[in-house]
Image (tube, coloured by chain):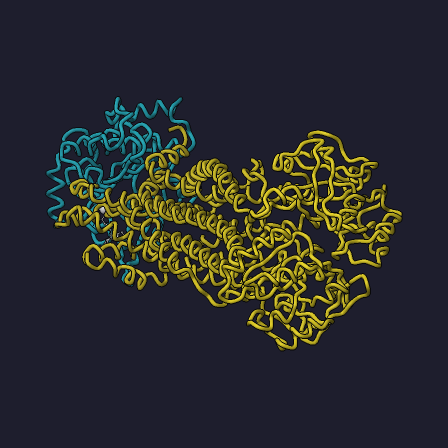
Amino acid sequence: MRDAVILEARNLTKRYRLGTRDVDALRGVSLQVRRGEFVALMGPSGSGKSTLLQLLGGLDRPTSGEVVLDGEVVSHLSDAEATRLRREKTGFVFQFFNLIPLLDVYENVALPYTIAGVDPRHGDAADRIREVLELVDLQGRERNRPDQLSAGEQQRVALARALVAKPAILLADEPTGNLDYATGGEILDELWHSCDALGQTIVLVTHDARAAAHADRVLVVGDGKIRDEIELGRRSTNRDAGPLIARLAQLGL
Amino acid sequence: MRRLSSLAWRSLGARKLRSFLTMVGIGLGVAVLYVSLSAGAAMDAAVDKAAADEIGKADVRVLALEERGLSKATVDVIDRIAGVSVVAPALERRSYLSASLTQTPTATLPPPVTVLGIDPVREPMLHDLPLVSGRLLAATDGQSALITQTLASGERLGLGDTISLNGTVAAGPQDYKIVGIVRGDGPLPRAEGRLVFLPLDSAQTLFGTTSITRVDLRAGPGVSVDELVGQLDATIQTQPYLLSRTQDLADSLRAEMADFRGALLLVAAVVLFAGAFLIFNTLSMTVAERGREVGLLRAAGTTRSQVMSFVLLQALVLGVLGSVLGVVCGIGLAVLTLSWVRSSGALDLAAPVLSAGSIAMALLIGVGITLAASLEPAWRAGRIPPVEALRRGPNGAVAGAARLRWLVLVFGVLALAALAMWPRASAGSSTGSLATGSGSSMWGPLVVYGLLLSTVLLLPLILGPLLRVAGLPFRIFRNEERLARSSLARDRSRTALTAGALVVSLAMVVALGTAAQNVRKIGANWLAETIPGSELLTSIRPISTTDPIIGQLAAVPGIKSISPIGIFGAPYVYTTQSGGRSHKSVVRQEAAAIVGRDYLGDGRLTFVAGDRASALGALDASGSVIVPESLADAANIRVGDSVEFATSTAPSRLHVVGIVAHSIPAGAQEAILIGWSDALNQFGVSGADFYAVRFVPGQEALGRAALDSAATSYALQPNDLDRVTGTVGDALDRIFRLLDALALIAVLVAGLGMVNTLSMTVLERGREIGVLRATGMTSRQVWGMVVIEAGILGVVGAIIGALVGLAVGALLVLWSSGGFGLAFDPPWPSIGLAVCFGILVSITAAIYPAGLASRQSIVQALQHE
Ligand SMILES: Nc1ncnc2c1ncn2[C@@H]1O[C@H](COP(=O)(O)OP(=O)(O)OP(=O)(O)O)[C@@H](O)[C@H]1O
Ligand SMILES: [Mg+2]
């Protein structure tokens, strides 16, 4: 079961049209993510990491190639089906602007239930929300508005929301990008914990080798392609980034 | 938050001012709409009441078309018709209470009274006469009278008192004993409450006649009104008459008010249109502003239709609250408006009644328009891609530029609503006149409305040059002006809509002003062109042409000439072609008996066809008629034709000797002009209704003073021509001022829209403003930039609004004036005022957003994300 492929990309390309000029953000990417795996995507700025993540989560459609998420071909779904898939199978954490400013912490976390038409204040949903708030260590802050939280706390709320509906896969695009090292570390520990203890599949985009060192496997993206793959394995302690940094240096990153 | 929909509420609550202003905008539109609807309802009520009062339980009224009335023989013929169950003849005349004549011999005359001679037995079978005291007239009554409560209190009369009435009898005034008092104003609106009922015989004696003016009929059991009408048509052969049914009467009354109702509806549509711009702009900017939030919701699995309904729900909330607010304000506004119109005396209105129908209609249209205007923003919100959530940088035009196609939709909804509510034209009514083409009355406003719409649609195309021109006055602040202009050019649709509301509303103000000016002019020109003199002496009863009064008046020092004019209804035979057969019908055509040679001297009466001198000569000779151009056009009459009249002597044909541009106004028509000899001999006219008086040049003051005292002793009312036109003009002025005031509400709605748009652009450009401030722009300059932005918008709106308004005004003038308005003369000072008002409203609207922009902290603006 653990080794089952939950997410697969086959020869993905993405071409953006910028006025008269075409930009090839992805030039043929294939990858597989197994259930419960923690994969990090690294690479220089503009290499296509975010684009890839968007395609994997069904936020956008590839120019060619396909994405299979939990047995469904995401890239060929209608908008309504893709929406349902996102709601049921994916959770997102972005670098910026993860929260609806009008809603408080509890309501932001409860959003996936609310969207699905489930009353989040009672029953299983309420239990689950309490659980994830505890996981990200935000109990007692339910009634706070996003602007009353620090950047790190905001990202933890975002993480809680991404996890609340137990998505098949969690996609995070530089979730620690604008946090200091210590705060970012807490988020990463929580991510790792959800993967290790709860079996959550995670794809993380990051620039930071110390963040990537939490992953089981690192994929290096360059110029719209997968350039390299570094297998780190599950390490419950000693997540030293040293060897990874050395390896990346070899690749000229 | 239990349900996603409550996010919509919160979204509204988060921007309270914006939501509030949008709501007020919708509310104002609905308020004006409600005024328009309830004015319509009040008019209908007044019309129905008038019609019911006049006809009562009768099915058909036979009205004499000739001055001399219907003869006894004709009444007997009607009486013998099988299908008739009740026949109630009556004689209606005007007179003076002779007591009041002697009370104040030198002051102006008291208002006349209307005398209605009725059959004491038959009349009550068809007309209710509610009494406050006393009894009804009895068959045996001779010198008895009923009077109305209004007359009783006005003249301090009571039961048992005696009134003295002036008639045509040589014996002088006759006395009547008051036996009963009729409640209120009585059943005859045109009597204005001063109504006296006499037994028919007594009335006939008083006025020296054996005829009657009308017969009311009730069909017998099992006889339909149509059958009755058919029998009447077949039976009455000898005298011209006019048949009217209750419905016809109501229709013709209604037709008189159709123009005013149409104008009110048009103004309401314009205010609503401006309100729709406000909704559209506000919602579409809210959508743009919340683009990333929407993206986030989409990324988290919200469906497109959920996003759309989220926007529509916001619109619905605003629409419902705004419409309720609007109806509440509208009820108050309607009371004010209608009392204002009533006090002008131009239209006879009932007090506004709260009708569930009008309220429901106003709410429905308010909400409907809100939803129509929000469809496009909602659709656009649904199209926001989920990747929007990840996009960095300023939250620019994420949702795409607003498309103006939707405007056509809103236009459609409004136009349909207007069509549904349009006052029903009474084209087929037998009492309708020939000269008023009833078909154009609905298309006119629709064309105006379409013109306004296309202007707004065209605005984005010419926005660039427009902005440059409008920026000129602000050039002294070079940087601010440039920045303001580029900010306006960024989203052309949005700018076009914001300015568009102003354009449309100012256009309406200018157009109404132009039309008002023109109508006033027409009023003044009309009489001056058609009356041979500078003073009118009006009489309440026709004065025989052989009466010595004329000679005596002509002898008054300072008076040069006296020209008698008699107004009467001529039974005009109108031939229509239908299905290859020509069909003849008789309609009442207003006619005026004049002395042709009195027009020879000065240039009055403009001939468009026929020779002036010979035509006027022929008129005095007999057998000729001069036709006003409006009738000639409508009935396709040319000089040399003959027109037929169903006079009682024999069908008489008069030879058309001339066509004049304008003729003497009578009723709602222009009168055909007939010589006195024909009027007396063929049309049964008994005398002149007024005299046109010309003074000896240089002796006007002397002549006028002498005339005043002489006239009063003959029970004549002297009227300065200027004063006559002045009174008419004042009444119209009040109506136009009212319409103008309502149109100004549209300008206010446009101002509200501007507050919203500017506040949002300021928020949207927060980062940009931060950068400007960081690089050295003072907060004062930022303030100035926003105010200049509004100023430019105001100038654009004012210029285009004034231009379009002039065009619309020209159209209104063209339609309404029957050729008088071709000398197009807009009221420049008031147009200037309207333009200034528009600019002022815009600049005032900028004060809040400008403060918002200038207070913004630099650090926060740059920190923001
Ligand atoms: N919406 C878009 N339209 C046009 N071009 C785009 C768009 N999004 C991304 N690109 C281009 O595609 C390429 C890949 O962008 P992407 O955001 O995926 O890079 P990235 O690896 O995430 O970079 P970073 O590390 O800076 O986040 C870049 O050259 C970018 O300019
Ligand atoms: Mg990126």
Q: Position of residue B853 (x, y in %)?
A: 23, 44
- Residue A78 seen anywhere in this rendered image of the structure: no
Foreground pick, B570 / A131: B570
x 50%, y 37%: residue: B331
In screen coordinates, is B799 left or right of B268? left
Q: Is residue B431 above or below residue A112?
A: below
Q: Is residue B849 above or below residue A111?
A: below
In screen coordinates, is B83 left or right of B674? right
Foreground pick, B514 / B145: B145
Q: Position of residue B749 (x, y in %)?
A: 39, 46
User: Is the N terminus of chain A in the top left, top right, bottom left or bottom right quadrant?
Assistant: top left
Foreground pick, B843 / B203: B203
> Hey, which quadrant is residue A83 in on the image?
top left
Q: Position of residue A106 (x, y in %)?
A: 31, 27
x 23%, y 40%: residue: A95
Q: Is residue B842 above or below residue B695?
A: above
Give the number of callouts.
Answer: 0
- Residue B432 seen anywhere in this rendered image of the structure: yes
In screen coordinates, is B210 left or right of A141? right
Q: Position of residue A223 (x, y in %)?
A: 21, 54
Q: Colour of chain A?
A: cyan
Foreground pick, B467 / B391: B467
In screen coordinates, is A221 left or right of B330? left
Q: Colour of chain B?
A: yellow
